[in-house]
Amino acid sequence: MTRLIPTEQELHAFVDDQLEPVRRAEVEAWLAANPEQAARIEAWRSDARRLRAALAGFNDMPHNPQLELAHLRRRVRQRRQQRFASAAVLLLALGLGGLGGWQARESTMLAGDLPMADAVQAHKLFADATALDVQADDPAQLQSWLGRHFNRVGQVPDLSGYGFQPVGARLLANEDGPAALLVFQDKKGERISLFMRSPGGRYDQMPSGQRVDGQLEARYWSHGDYNFALVSAADDARSEQLRKVLGVSL
């Protein structure tokens, strides 16, 4: 009997081009009939491409099996199976955050299991405009972009009254599926980000909370079908009011 629904391991093998041709054709047909899953797999592909590009500069270094792509992907799969829902954004911190620094951050985050740690990591890595997938200068553009990747998302608010204009967004992936980072900037160049993702195994529906991570502050909450985090400078007095506005809108 044909196995119509691929397993998680087969999907990873599909991304890594390790499936037999017949099974690969079956998985491609299944993805064609399941666009949401296809979008998730495409995000994995994009992550893998960024990882390969980021590791290109390591070609002249002594061989280290710990840095091989297959080994790194195995570690990510193991973390997913163990349901470490607050692990860093899937593969992204590996590629752009620096391998040595990422490994240290990973140990710290897994030990503390901090809520929405992936939101803070995403802000650190991708809040710069050059790292965004889409450039947007008004909320309507972000709304349209979100609608292509997420279901049942509320209205992206206009934050111009608080001095912030949209900059753009980036599509990410974590152990629970697609995630997104929306970036806003004020006239002084200060940036905030709104991170959203599906609830994870440990933090299903989170009560509103906040925590400081170095010079950044994360305010997090659950609303509708998603978990959210607003990441801003720890000393930004506008952050609480912004969180309230975003919490009602999305």
Image (cartoon, rainbow, N blue to C red):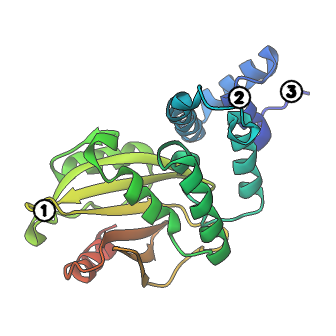
Instruction: From the image, tell me which residue sits under label 2.
Output: 14
Going 78% across and 15% down the picture, which residue do you hit?
21
Q: Quadrant of residue 31?
A: top right
| Of labels 3 and 2, the one closer to you | 2
Sequence-first tag of 3 and 2: 3
Q: Which of the pair 157/235 is nearer the observer?
A: 235
Q: Is residue 86 left or right of residue 214?
A: right
Picture coordinates of residue 37, whole percent (x, y): 60, 40
The residue furthest top is 21
Q: Is residue 85 left or right of residue 128?
A: right
| Of labels 2 and 1, the one closer to you | 1
Residue 74 visible in the shown view: yes
Picture coordinates of residue 93, whole percent (x, y): 52, 50
Q: Residues within 10 Å of mark 3 (few under 14, many from 20)?
A: few
State the mark number for residue 186.
1
Q: Is disc 2 in contact with disc 1, using a CB cutoff of under 8 Å?
A: no
Check disc 3 and report its element: helix, strand or loop.
loop
